[in-house]
Image (cartoon, rainbow, N blue to C red):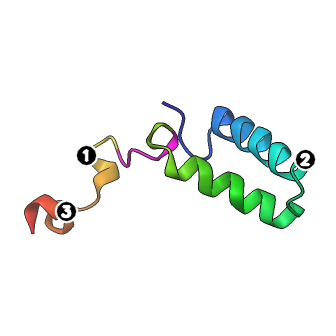
Amino acid sequence: MPEPGSKKYDTQRARKRKEAERSGISDQDANAAADEELQSDPKWRSRGPRTERGKGPKGERPENA
């Protein structure tokens, strides 16, 4: 699954931004609209850390609280 910051995500965001610009939305608003649209789709949302180290210190993890 593509995540924010990946090449596939950036390519898709650029396409969405172009579509928004063609429909009459300003440049700054088109960029925000493209990001918002992709973030609302579960396919493009970040899945979070996938390794033990990425989850942070053991004492501060949500499952240990």
Q: Earlier in the sequence, mark 2 or mark 1?
A: 2
* Mark drawn on residue 18: none
Residue range (magenta): 44-49
Q: Is residue 41 left or right of residue 38?
A: left
Between circles 2 and 1, the one closer to the viewer is 2
Residue nearest the observer in this picture, 65 or 18: 18
Residue 57: quarter of image: bottom left
Between circles 3 and 2, the one closer to the viewer is 2
Judging by the rendered image, the residue that carries numbered circle 1 is 52
Judging by the rendered image, the residue that carries numbered circle 2 is 22
Does 53 appear above or below 28? above
Q: Position of residue 15 (x, y in %)?
A: 78, 38
Q: Secondary structure at mark 3?
A: loop
Q: Position of residue 22 (x, y in %)?
A: 90, 47
Q: Earlier in the sequence, mark 3 or mark 2?
A: 2
Q: Could you tell me the amino acid type at mark 3?
A: Arg
Residue shown at 29%/59% (left/top)? 56
1 and 3 marks in contact (CB < 8 Å)? no
